[in-house]
Structures are given as C-alpha cells and as structure tokens.
C-alpha cells in the first residue's frame, strides 16, 4: 500500500513524457504560394505605345479546391487532401494576383488590376478566368484546364473566349515541385490571354477584336 502513491506518481510522469514526445514528433505544416513570371522571363506579347488597362474578375475555382489543404489526384476519381501541405491563404486570390502580375509584365503595363480596382478609371479590357480542372498527380503531372474571356471595357464587347489546357510533367513527388509546375501552367495560360489583348495605339480608336494599326510616322 505504501508503494501505491509512488507508483501512481511514476505513471503520471510516464504518461506526460509520452505525450510530450508525441507532440515533439508531430510534423509541422508547410505553406506554399504561387510565383508570377519574373521580368527576365516576360516578353511583352504586343508592346503598346500607350499601355492598356485591364481589370481582372475574381478567379473562379472548383469547390473541391477551395480549401487550405493542397488537393492531389489518386487514380481516375479519388482525391487526397494533404494535411500538412497547405496553401498560404486563398488559392483563388493567389491565382488572381499572379495572373495580374503576369499580364502586367506580358503587356508591358502597370495598369492591370484585380477587381475591385485600386483606381476609378474605366479599363480598356476585362478578363475573367474560371479554373475547370487542376489535377495534381504526384510524380506524374499537373493538368490545368481553364476557361477565360477577354472583353472590351467600353462596351463589354467580347474579344475572345477560349479554353486553355496545359500539362506540366513532374520529376518527383515533392510538393515544391508540384506547386512550381502549377505556377508554370498559369504562366502559359497568362500568355494565351495576353495574345488576345490588342495593343492600344494613339490616334483613332481600335475596334475590339481587330489588330491595332501602328500610327504613321
């Protein structure tokens, strides 16, 4: 009976130590964000004498991607949620911001904004983007399929509506490699969009959807 309190005390210490050891060994979450084009990578698709202004609508993403955990695909119909590999904030907002930076570099313009705009001016063009698929298969590939529309700002006339489908191979199963591949996929979609935004030249207005005609020397 005398050893009872001592034994109970020893058990409490052992349980507490086991709990601390378990906490110490738990993996910590890692957070990722997409990176836009660098100025060295960007070559303006159609340099303009007067930079165009573009307003980008909030990017739409599927419900299954609208979460902090990075979602990967396992087979044809199964999805996995990574408990400790997470997006550093809203994936939709991250894609919108990166798209704006990419288009600004590709168009040679500092007047590309994500709606709501920081400036009250009426933009020359509106861009909307909807992610249809973002399939990340570790060790295999990233498949990005996106539908987008470019419309003239003055009257909202549609300039182009396209679906871009981009596949990027993965050299390993690491999440840093996967996130980088998502960024490269978004770069290619940004280039597709930039090619459909005509340059604005001084002089007579250019009809939406028609190529800009350089001013006469």
Image (tube, helix red, strand yellow):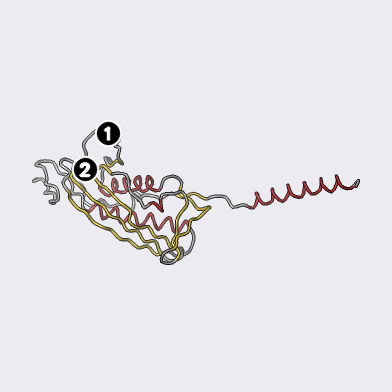
Give how far across and how far down residue 162 sits, in percent: 23, 56
Give how far across and how far down residue 16 sits, in percent: 73, 47
Q: Residue furthest right?
A: 2
Q: Residue at x 13, y 49 (%)?
A: 212
Horizontal relation, residue 16 to residue 213: left or right? right
Q: Quadrant of residue 169?
A: bottom left
Nearer to me, 183 or 80: 80
Q: Is residue 56 above or below residue 185?
A: above
Residue of label 2: 52
Q: Quadrant of residue 191?
A: bottom left
Residue of label 1: 119
Q: Tell me which label, 1 or 2, sits earlier in the chain.
A: 2
Q: Residue furthest front?
A: 1
Q: Is residue 80 above or below residue 107?
A: below
Give how far across and how far down residue 84 sits, in percent: 53, 52
Quadrant in the picture for the C terminus: top left
Q: Secondary structure at mark 2?
A: loop
Nearer to me, 212 or 41: 212
Q: Residue at x 31, y 41 (%)?
A: 114
């Amino acid at each position: 009976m005398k050893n009872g309190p001592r034994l109970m005390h020893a058990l409490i210490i052992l349980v507490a130590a086991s709990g601390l050891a378990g906490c110490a060994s738990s993996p910590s979450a890692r957070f990722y964000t997409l990176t836009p084009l660098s100025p060295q990578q960007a070559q303006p698709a159609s340099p303009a004498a007067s930079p165009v202004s573009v307003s980008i609508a909030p990017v739409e993403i599927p419900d299954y991607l609208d979460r902090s955990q990075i979602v990967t695909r396992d087979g044809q119909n199964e999805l996995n949620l990574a408990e400790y590999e997470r997006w550093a904030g809203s994936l939709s907002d991250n894609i919108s911001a990166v798209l704006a930076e990419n288009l600004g570099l590709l168009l040679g313009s500092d007047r590309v904004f994500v709606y709501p705009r920081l400036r009250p001016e009426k933009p020359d063009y509106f861009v909307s983007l909807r992610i249809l698929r973002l399939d990340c298969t570790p060790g295999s590939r990233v498949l990005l399929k996106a539908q987008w529309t470019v419309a003239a700002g003055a009257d909202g006339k549609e300039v182009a509506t396209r679906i871009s489908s981009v596949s990027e191979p993965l050299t390993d199963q690491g999440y840093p490699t996967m996130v980088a591949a998502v960024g490269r996929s978004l770069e290619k979609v940004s280039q597709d969009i930039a090619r459909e935004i005509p340059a604005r030249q001084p002089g007579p207005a250019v009809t939406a959807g028609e190529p800009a005609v350089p001013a006469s020397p």
